[in-house]
Amino acid sequence: MVIQNPSAETAPAGANSSARSAFRPQDGRQQNLALVIRTLYANPGLSRADLARLTGLTRVTISDLVAELIASGLLVETGASNEIRPGKRATRLQVATESRAILAVDLSGETTLSGAIYSLAGKQLDRVESPVSKGEAALGEVKSLVRQLAKSAKAPVLGVGVGTPGTVEGSLVTAANLDWHFLDLAAELAQGSGLPVDVENDANLAALAEWRFAGGAADLIRVQLARGVGAGLLLDGVTITGSSGAAGEIGHVVIEHNGEPCPCGKRGCLETWISVSALSKRFESGPESREQILAEAGRRLGMALSPIIGMLDLVDVVVGGPEDLVTGAFLEAAQDLVLERTGIESRRPVQLRQSTLGGDAVLLGAAALVLRTQLGVY
């Protein structure tokens, strides 16, 4: 049983989640099922009466929906409530988090692709890695990884979430480092696996993971330092992708006129200063100046972020990347410059902090994407 969330205008199985479909009256029941799942996911232990009160649905409707979800295995009863009320004690309900498996794939690694199996609660049950190449060979490797994960899953698979570098526009992926150009990755993987597949930019998924699984704000920016520099933006828990799927591509914002040449053709892009490879080269040329280099890099990140933070009134900025780079000197310099350029009396101060998700941010975001598109949990 799959509960797609019509209020989020999700795409059919095998299509990218950003593809839109019109709301139809017959989707009302699906919407109500998603509402029950979403409410219990956030508030485990509610009774049927609690659900009716919180959702605004009638008790008869709630009883019918709960019965269907229990029959499907997605909900379980966990015993009588401790609340003292007249009559029979109410029965608590919760999402059966082990009843389905989510397959997550991260294509952002320089030399490897990662896959994992998650429970509905975001618990990692298994993880595998394999080499990744380019072009058709890379596509074949991703398909093989999905098949391997599906075979290893101990519960029915809810869906597959994929985080990829590059631009995701509708159902098409353009990723230069994988030599993919307008590849319909979701359709390719769905055809090969028979499973619903959702594909999104890796930085966007990392931002989604910070909100869903790491206590981040519903309005946040998540910056990733890797081979390049990317960012994901959430507003009210919604991923902002832009008209062409390129929102968050801050790596090619010019922060230093007449700076070093960038592979994109411009000079002085942010990536020429704070990507992992750029910082490594600077350390090699001046190892005794490591802290100063990190501080200078942090200031340049602050230059790129300040207009965004000022325009959107954001206060939560999360930075992911190698722990030896995303350190005090780097973050402190970035925060100082952001506060210097955006601070006003009426605005809460911005907090720049290191991500706690390590190397699992994109995988967790892919799992969160499947929860959203297949069960309506957001």
Image (tube, rainbow, N blue to C red):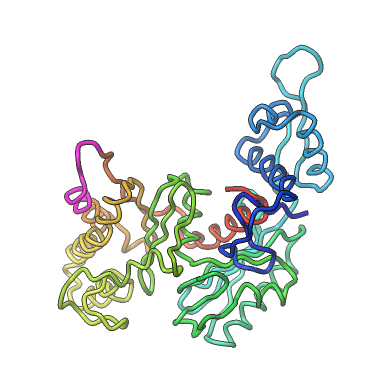
Along the line of sight, the residue nearer the viewer: 322 or 62: 62
Along the line of sight, the residue nearer the viewer: 134 or 171: 171
> Does the magenta run of residues contain 345?
yes
Q: Give the quarter of the figure containing the N terminus.
A: bottom right
Q: Main secondary structure of the magenta part?
A: helix
Q: Examine the rendered structure and indicate whether residue 87 appears above or below residue 1.
A: above
Residue at x-position 75% and y-position 71%:
194
Q: Examine the rendered structure and indicate whether residue 90 appears above or below residue 65.
A: above
Where does the image place residue 85, in percent across and percent down from the top left?
73, 14
Residue at x-position 21% and y-position 75%:
268
Residue at x-position 49% and y-position 67%:
201
* For residue 23, side relative to residue 258 (left or right): right
Where does the image place residue 234, in percent across and percent down from the top left?
44, 53
Badge count: 0
* For residue 149, side relative to residue 133 (left or right): right
Confirm whether residue 124 shows in the render: no
Along the line of sight, the residue nearer the viewer: 268 or 247: 247
Confirm whether residue 28 shows in the render: yes
Where does the image place residue 126, in percent across and percent down from the top left?
65, 62
Residues rendered magenta in the picture: 336-346
